[in-house]
């Protein structure tokens, strides 16, 4: 099956123009049409074997209409039903509150971001993916004959997207992705251990990615748990990139949104230009990096993307804004100055843009360490490689209380064994305020559309409580 | 590419068909004559409406329409699947999907058991769960009235910094045709209203979420005491500002029906899904007929509980839905299954197949999952003999590792129990445990069991679910 028709982008852009023509003919002067169409192949693996092969495509159009600072939105799948969607969006706009100063962004030239498209992915077919899936299953068996892939799979996708606005923005492009996710389990002597690991890239994954061997390693590392004194409370914790990113992604992107800061809905509200985390730490959101999973030359409303410094040397120095959120917070008097930072995100054609992150980097000006170095620095504590319930963290307060079955005990700088299960709780903002040491190995985690976390292994020395079961 | 025909909100869903039945049936016949042992086409057309309001002002309203169809072809004991929004292309995608299945089959080793499907009755009919008040006839202004009421009841205190309200309603129309002759259409609606209250006192900032909804039309929202819903959320948010951090360690836990529902969904429901059992990823593998819980634990999953957020008349393999009894008096009696896993385990199909939408293939999923009621009169009776423990309420979600049988769920708010009395409010309470241990530790249930707030379940695909039960006591749980 063909992954992407040759004329996919042309057809999308023609559809946008057709809807735009309808807007113009209906006398609407301020409009934005977005379109997306994705295609993919996917192989599922269950119980150590390939369970199914799937393919297909989906897409549609979104229409945002602005009238006197009021906006309405509707989405549709069929260009021929555009009039109905346009009228819906218009009637919604007329019922919406007006935001003084809110206009659609104007055209600005945007620098192309490379590395988001790999022709060799487009050329892959289901047979190629089946071969890769077989290789993953074989690799797991070769690393440990007890280990099997109990779930997961491999997939490729191509996404064509387009934006056309009344303000002269006309842009479109194709991105590709190739991803692997595996749940590896080892069951022996009535003991089952498992680990989920994944890897994804805009470019073709040529060989079996190392997430597969990591999954086997962690399924092995967590076997034969030891008993430890459960009275220990606050403790240093070394969270791997995979373990930390899910918690970080629930809490931090929310806290650095401009509208959340302005509305006092962020734990960092009112702290602009103040120290909020350890002074060696920096937080940067950069949608322009080559091959970045959430990179793009323009944001979700067509504004050129850029690198936004958010926390510099521990001080909060910036925030993320879309056009509407910036105008609204000024109009409602919560902030004097705000403008788009090229940070409008949208989950496809079905939603209007909101403020959000792209590729979010946590870095340190201090020396970074490899895993052994971090263990030596920690001396005594725990290594956590994944948590259950990261989505239950409270993005407003930064508090979290999660569970892990992928936790190792460290004494005298060395791993002495695994623990069957433990609770892990704390507050993200407080945990990052001091005694944080970063590793040297970033493994990006997260969603292409709503933000990718570029967070390394993180040693947190204070503020986390571990409660072994 | 993008579809050629879109859902029309003027259509009632009773007689209109998006699929050309004759043409699709011919292509299903052809693909079986070319080597498929089974083939099906399932089309889902949605019309939906989402609204967001912040502090009483309309933030966004999104009317939408979606259509998608999935072809599944079983050949030589393996599946090929194709999903698309391009309904006009379905016939031409049938043979490529057959080839996909044959490619998978060719790579299987001879020792791999070929996939077969359990026999089911072949039905041709239409079932439409017609709501009293069709959501598609609801004006935006009417939706906003309900949301404004929620906003006003949740607002009005100096420490409340914002109230956001949400609305989502949808009409779901499904058509199902199979090479076996199944020809069914069904439709139903869901409606939901929710709110989130954020409160702040100095540097302390907290939030509380509330939600009401289920299967049904506007009448469902009209049956809700929205004033009470909003006011309760406000009171809870303000209480969280003063709440202390929860104690850690093993202790007795009393859970309200929201948390009881999430507990039974995570701890038992997921490990009962037969596709996970067959994949070797369930702690309940091989335990059918065994005692895994205390005598008072009886658990059902029932898609036919009208009004439940997980209610649906027909599963996504075209089977009439039915009540499943997962545990009866502590004994594991049934896995949730679909046709493939029913055949795999040699058990009766129980219509547990659900897909997120027309663009996803069906997996084994829960619907409305409940623990039956017990013998305790009320909350007071459950806590009266607890010396030190936690009473936890409201759900912030949960997660399970089905293979290891470990789970976690988080409460929105909680109280300390001291000497049989509910005392100080607590925040950030989460509970974790092991399925096979904690089911045995359920030692008290109140009499009244019913569904709690609607929820969503993720398993690669997201589906709406209803969970609930009575107020439940667990003798020992790991509280974090």
Image (cartoon, rainbow, N blue to C red):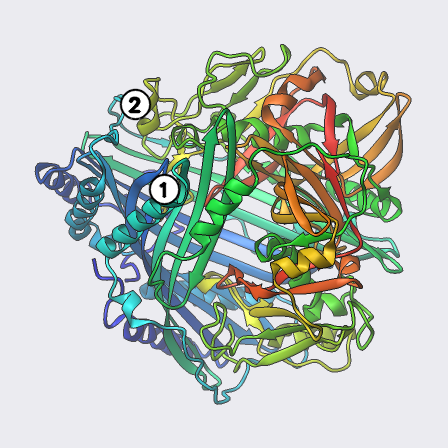
Q: Position of residue B242 (x, y in %)?
A: 89, 46
* Res. B149 in view: no
Neighbours of disc 2 within 10 Å: few (<14), some (14-19), many (20+): some
User: Is A422 located above or below residue A10 in the figure?
Assistant: above
Chain letter of disc 2? B
- The quadrant the N terminus of chain A occupies is bottom left
- For the point 23% across and 71% down, the residue is A6
Q: Position of residue B456 (x, y in %)?
A: 55, 41
Of the pair B226 and A448, the residue shown nearer to us: A448
- For the point 77% across and 81% down, the residue is A336
Of the pair B26 and A359, the residue shown nearer to us: A359
**Mark 2 and mark 1 residues within 8 Å of each other at the beta carbon:** no
Q: Which mark is residue B20?
A: none
Q: Position of residue B281 (x, y in %)?
A: 45, 33
Going by the picture, which residue comes out furthest to the left? B33
Q: How many discs appear?
A: 2
- For the point 31% across and 73% down, the residue is A9
Q: Which mark is residue A141?
A: 1
Q: Nearer the viewer, mark 2 or mark 1?
A: 1
A389 vs A345, left or right, is right
Going by the picture, which residue comes out furthest to the bottom? A109
Chain letter of disc 1? A
Q: Which residue is mark 2?
A: B343
- The quadrant the C terminus of chain A occupies is top right
């Amino acid at each position: 099956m063909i992954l992407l028709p040759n004329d996919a982008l042309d057809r999308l852009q023609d559809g946008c123009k057709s809807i735009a023509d309808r807007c113009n003919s209906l006398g609407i002067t301020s409009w934005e049409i977005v379109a997306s169409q994705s295609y993919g192949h996917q192989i599922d693996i269950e119980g150590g074997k390939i369970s199914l092969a799937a393919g297909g495509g989906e897409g549609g159009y979104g229409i945002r209409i602005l009238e006197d600072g009021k906006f309405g939105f509707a989405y549709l799948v069929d260009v021929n039903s555009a009039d109905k969607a346009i009228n819906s969006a218009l009637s919604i706009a007329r019922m919406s509150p007006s935001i003084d100063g809110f206009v659609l962004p104007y055209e600005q030239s945007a620098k192309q971001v490379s590395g988001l498209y790999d022709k060799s992915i487009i050329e892959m077919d289901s047979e190629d993916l089946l071969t890769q899936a077989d290789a993953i299953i074989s690799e797991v068996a070769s690393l440990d004959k007890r280990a099997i892939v109990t779930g997961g799979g491999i997939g490729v996708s191509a996404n064509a997207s387009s934006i056309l606005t009344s303000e002269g923005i006309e842009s479109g492009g194709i991105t590709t992705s190739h991803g692997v996710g595996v749940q590896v389990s080892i069951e022996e002597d009535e003991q089952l251990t498992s680990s989920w690991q994944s890897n994804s890239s805009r470019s073709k994954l040529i060989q079996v990615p190392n997430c597969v061997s990591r999954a086997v390693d962690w399924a092995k590392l967590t076997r034969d748990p030891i008993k430890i004194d459960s009275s220990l409370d606050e403790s240093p914790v070394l969270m791997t990139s995979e373990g930390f990113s899910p918690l970080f992604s629930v809490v931090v992107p929310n806290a650095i949104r401009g509208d959340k800061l302005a509305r006092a809905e962020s734990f960092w509200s009112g702290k602009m230009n103040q120290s909020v985390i350890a002074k060696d730490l920096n937080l940067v959101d950069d949608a322009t990096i080559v091959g970045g999973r959430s990179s793009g030359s323009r944001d979700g409303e067509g504004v050129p993307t850029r690198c936004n410094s958010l926390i510099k040397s521990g001080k909060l120095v910036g925030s993320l804004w879309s056009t509407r959120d910036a105008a609204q917070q000024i109009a409602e008097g919560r902030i004097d100055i705000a403008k788009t930072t090229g940070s409008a995100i949208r989950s496809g054609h079905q939603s209007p843009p909101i403020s959000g992150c792209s590729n979010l980097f946590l870095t340190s000006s201090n020396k970074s360490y490899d895993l052994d170095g971090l263990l030596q620095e920690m001396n005594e504590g725990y290594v956590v490689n994944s948590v259950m319930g990261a989505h239950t963290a409270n993005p407003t307060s930064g508090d979290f209380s999660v569970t892990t079955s992928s936790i190792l005990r460290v004494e005298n700088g060395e791993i002495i064994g695994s623990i069957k299960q433990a609770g892990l709780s704390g507050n993200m903002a407080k945990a990052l305020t001091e005694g944080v040491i970063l590793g040297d190995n970033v493994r990006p985690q997260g969603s292409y559309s709503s933000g990718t976390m570029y967070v390394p292994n993180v040693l947190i020395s204070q503020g986390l409580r571990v409660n072994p079961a | 590419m993008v579809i050629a025909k879109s859902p029309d909100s003027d259509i009632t869903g009773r007689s209109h068909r998006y699929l050309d039945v004759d043409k699709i049936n011919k292509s299903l016949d052809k693909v079986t004559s070319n080597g498929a042992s089974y083939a099906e086409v399932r089309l889902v057309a949605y019309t939906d409406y989402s609204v967001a309001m912040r502090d009483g002002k309309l933030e966004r309203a999104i009317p939408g329409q979606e259509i998608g169809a999935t072809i599944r072809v079983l050949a030589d004991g393996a599946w090929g699947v194709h999903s698309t929004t391009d309904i006009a292309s379905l016939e031409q995608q049938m043979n490529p999907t057959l080839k996909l299945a044959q490619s998978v089959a060719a790579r299987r080793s001879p020792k791999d058991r070929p996939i077969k499907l359990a026999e089911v009755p072949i039905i041709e009919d239409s079932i439409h769960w017609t709501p009293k008040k069709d959501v598609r006839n609801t004006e935006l202004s009417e939706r906003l009235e309900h949301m404004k009421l929620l906003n006003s009841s949740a607002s009005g205190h100096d420490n409340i910094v914002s109230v956001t309200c949400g609305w989502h309603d949808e009409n779901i129309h499904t058509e199902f045709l199979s090479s076996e002759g199944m020809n069914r259409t069904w439709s139903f609606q869901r409606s939901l209203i929710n709110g989130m209250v954020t409160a702040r006192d100095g540097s302390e900032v907290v939030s509380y979420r509330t939600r009401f909804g289920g299967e049904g039309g506007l009448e469902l929202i009209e049956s809700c005491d929205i004033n009470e819903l909003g006011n309760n959320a406000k009171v809870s948010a303000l209480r969280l500002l003063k709440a202390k951090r929860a104690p850690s360690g093993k202790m007795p836990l009393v859970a309200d029906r929201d948390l009881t529902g999430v507990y039974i969904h995570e701890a038992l429901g997921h490990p009962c899904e037969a596709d996970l059992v067959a994949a070797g990823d369930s702690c309940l593998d091989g335990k059918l007929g065994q005692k895994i819980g205390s005598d008072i634990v009886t658990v059902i999953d029932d898609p036919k509980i009208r009004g439940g957020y997980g209610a649906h008349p027909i599963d996504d393999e075209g089977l009439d839905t039915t009540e499943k009894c997962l545990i009866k008096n502590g004994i594991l009696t049934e896995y949730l299954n679909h046709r493939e896993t029913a055949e795999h385990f040699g058990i009766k199909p129980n219509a547990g197949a659900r897909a997120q939408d027309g663009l996803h293939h069906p997996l084994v999923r829960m619907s409305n999952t409940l623990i039956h009621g017990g013998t305790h009169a009320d909350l007071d009776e459950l806590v009266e003999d607890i010396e030190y423990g936690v009473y936890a309420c409201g759900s912030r979600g949960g997660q399970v590792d089905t293979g290891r049988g470990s789970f976690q769920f988080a409460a929105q708010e909680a109280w300390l129990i001291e000497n049989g009395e509910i005392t100080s409010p607590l925040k950030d309470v989460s509970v974790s445990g092991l399925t096979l241990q904690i089911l045995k530790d359920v030692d008290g249930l109140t009499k009244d069991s019913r569904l709690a707030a609607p929820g969503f379940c993720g398993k690669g695909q997201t589906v709406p679910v209803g969970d609930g039960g009575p107020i439940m006591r667990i003798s020992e749980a790991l509280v974090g």
